[in-house]
Amino acid sequence: MSKSFDSAGLTFRKDYFDDRAAWTALVSLLDDTFGIDIGPLRHLGGPDPTSMPFGWFASNDTLAANLTAFAMPIVVNGRQIEAGAFQSGAVRPPWRRRGLYRDLTRKALEWCEGRQFEAIVLYTDKPSLYESYGFSILPMHRYCGGAPKPRSATNSARQLDPWNKTDFALLQEALKTRAPVSDVLAVSGNAAMFLVNTQLDTEVRLSWLDEEKAIIAWKAGAAGRFSLLDVVAAEIPPLAVILGRLGALPEHVDVFFSPDKLDWGGEAVAFDNGTAFMLRTTTDLAPASPAMLSPMADF
Ligand SMILES: CC(C)(COP(=O)(O)OP(=O)(O)OC[C@H]1O[C@@H](n2cnc3c(N)ncnc32)[C@H](O)[C@@H]1OP(=O)(O)O)[C@@H](O)C(=O)NCCC(=O)NCCS
């Protein structure tokens, strides 16, 4: 028998992103719950157009509970997978432990079933919330190793600023036509999350390689380390070319996705930032080698 829930005084709504007050209520819920401000997303192309938010509202400007589902096509072992994803799952403290989140999870799962997704993915610090729905943890791995000798002309990269109109147009175009950064595990679209992630981590730098028509998302690490977070391009350039164009001369490189397209090898190291990546699928979707989704695809 299905468990009941208590929604006294609340109104259920879905698909409400076009309602400015409801969107603001979500921004506030996520800021209060996770300390994350997704407000800038509205000015950076808006939320993913496939987003389907499900929420219980206390009033037009107070969202008591939310869970958003959206389409997130991914590539696993070279195969394109039509996947769904869950994000922005939160319930305000006065309305917790009434079964509201269970209700929203069921509604979001039903929406995904209607779309016939082969898999559903999510990130969470509470995996037990999702295990009974058939989600299981997929361990994530980054790659570490010595830097290759930089190839090609040095220092020809240009820094991009998403708030600059020209740069933003370039970013949008590159995201539209990108190839997956890896064949083992990668997103194949998801422009909205890339753009919002440029704002959530202030250390992320975006550089444009004109010759390769590639955007490099990277961070300068401590003590001669270089962190490569993502590459947005129709053809992924080798790591040696990327370092050359950036004029970077690190000793060590950390790559936060499977480097199968980088013409470089490193050692796979378990990546644990306290958040689990979970997958629900009826098919076998285990990556053939250790991998992780780029942090620029975090949702
Ligand atoms: C986690 C959270 C969404 C739960 O919302 P809720 O409306 O209180 O949850 P429900 O009452 O619908 O309970 C749903 C199930 O989760 C369990 N649960 C509730 N809070 C939990 C918690 N903090 N940790 C683990 N399980 C929890 C309940 O026991 C229940 O299990 P059941 O379906 O087997 O009976 C809410 O506490 C919250 O917003 N927390 C902060 C943000 C967060 O952690 N979001 C989810 C991470 S992606």
Image: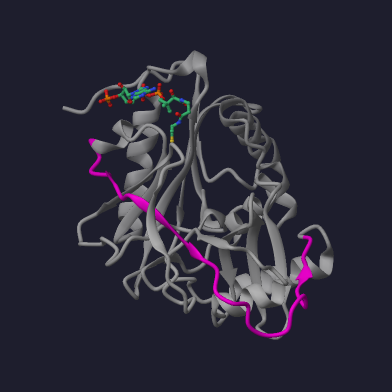
Foreground residue among 217 and 11: 217
Q: In the picture provided, is 108 more to the left or to the right than 251?
A: left
Nearest to the observer: residue 275 or residue 176: 275
Residue 251 covered by magenta stretch? no
As drawn, 128 above or below 138: above
Is residue 182 left or right of 170 when viewed as pictured?
left
Measuring from the top left, give residue 243's x and y in whole percent.
64, 72
Helix, strand or loop: magenta stretch: loop
On whether residue 150 falls in the magenta region, the answer is: yes
Looking at the image, residue 118 lies above or below residue 33 = below
Write the residue at 50% across / 22% down: 10
- Report the image quarter containing ligand 1: top left
State whether residue 219 is above or below residue 122: below
Q: What stretch is highlighted in magenta?
A: 132-161
Residue 213: percent from left, percent from top: 67, 81
**Which image quarter holds the N terminus?**
top left
